[in-house]
Every structure is written in structure tokens, then in C-alpha cells.
Amino acid sequence: MASYCALALAGLLHFVIGVTIFITPGTKSCSPAPVLASWISIGGILMIIGNLNLNYPWYTRLPHGLQVIVEVGILLGLLEFYSLVIWCKLERLLYLILRHILLTLGMSESAYLTYEYGMLAVATTLMALALCFVVKLATSTSFFVESERDPMIYLNMELYEEVVSRKKQRMRRVLLH
């Protein structure tokens, strides 16, 4: 699992790069949608890459400071690749589908251009929130634990029998009093 320090640094660097430099892929590969959905989807990707296993044999022999630097580089590269390549393609696909459907259903070109920004904002934000929800379901194990008080624990048989016998003794004492 990637360290939280490296994950936070990579997220912060990605944010700073996005705000100050903002490497734009161009309107031919992305859509004219606002960047809010892009930042939401970056949060989902941070959840995914936070669960990456970076404990390779060559990596664990490095000093801790160098491990963090390597992790930040790897995570920042993954974030930039996702935001500039994958998210732009998904956003562009959604833009083209929405445009085709609305213009085919009879919406005028001028009306579409008037409301395009708002419709794309809603559509891309919903897509990013759906991505985050699916990622949260996939990466979180707390959704699958039936009871927070009694999670399943794998124990050896002697320890299990001892715990059960103690619990039975306590129950007998409670019932007798």
C-alpha cells in the first residue's frame, strides 16, 4: 500500500501543477466541461492508487526518504496519466454522446450551445461521483463486514476453545445472579 505521506504529496503536487501550469490536452481530446468533475474523479483515483502495493524487493531496501520520493514520482505519474489521457477520453466520449442524443432528439443548435456548459457540468460530475462510489465499494472492506462489534477473526483452535469456555462461564454467572 502506498504511504499516506506520498499519496498526500502526490495529490498536492498534482493540484499545484493543475492550478499553476495546467497542462491542457486540447479541446480535440477533451470536452469543454468544467474541471470540477475532473477533480472529483482524481479523488476516486487517489483511493485506487492508495491501495497499490509498492513493496518490491528493490524498493524496500531504499532509505525511507527515498522510498517516499519514489512513491511520489510513481503516484504523480499515474495521476497525470489518468487525468490527461483516461479522464479526457471519458469526458470527450460523454460530451459526444450527450451532444448526439440532444441534437437527435430535436434540440436546436443555439439552445444546445446556450446550455452546453451546465449540461456537461451535471453529466461529468455525475459520472465522476459514480466512479468514486464504485471505487469506494471496491477498495473499502468495511461495506462487507456485517457487524462492527463482531467481525470474523481467524484463530487457532485452542485459543478459540478457551475464549468460548470463558464466555460460557460468564454467561452462567450472569444467569445465576
Image (tube, rainbow, N blue to C red):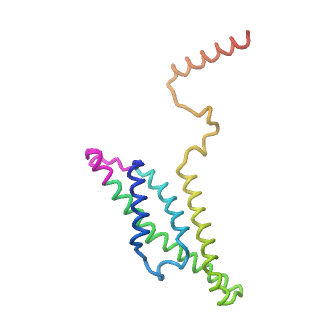
Side of 90 where 167 appears, left or right? right
29, 112: nearer the viewer: 112
Q: From the top left corner, tell me how far across and down residue 166 is, in percent.
A: 60, 15
Q: From the top left corner, tell me how far across and down residue 149 is, in percent.
A: 62, 32
Which residue shows up at 47% across the image and 83% down it? 28
Q: Is residue 134 above or below residue 107?
A: above
Side of 6 where 159 appears, left or right? right
Marks counted in the figure total: 0
Query: Residue extending furthest front?
Result: 20
Q: Is residue 136 above or below residue 172?
A: below
Name the image quarter holding residue 98. Answer: bottom right
Name the image quarter holding residue 147. Answer: top right
Side of 106 where 32 appears, left or right? left
48, 27: nearer the viewer: 27
Q: From the top left corner, tell me how far across and down residue 163 is, in percent.
A: 57, 19
Q: Is residue 82 magenta?
A: no
Query: Residue extending furthest top?
Result: 176
Quadrant housing the C terminus: top right
Which residue shows up at 51% across the image and 59% down it? 43
Which residue shows up at 44% across the image and 80% down it? 26
Which residue shows up at 44% across the image and 69% down it? 19
Q: From the top left corner, tell me how far across and down residue 109 is, in percent.
A: 65, 90
Q: Is residue 65 magenta?
A: yes
Side of 12 where 70 appears, left or right? left
**What segment carries the magenta color?**
53-69
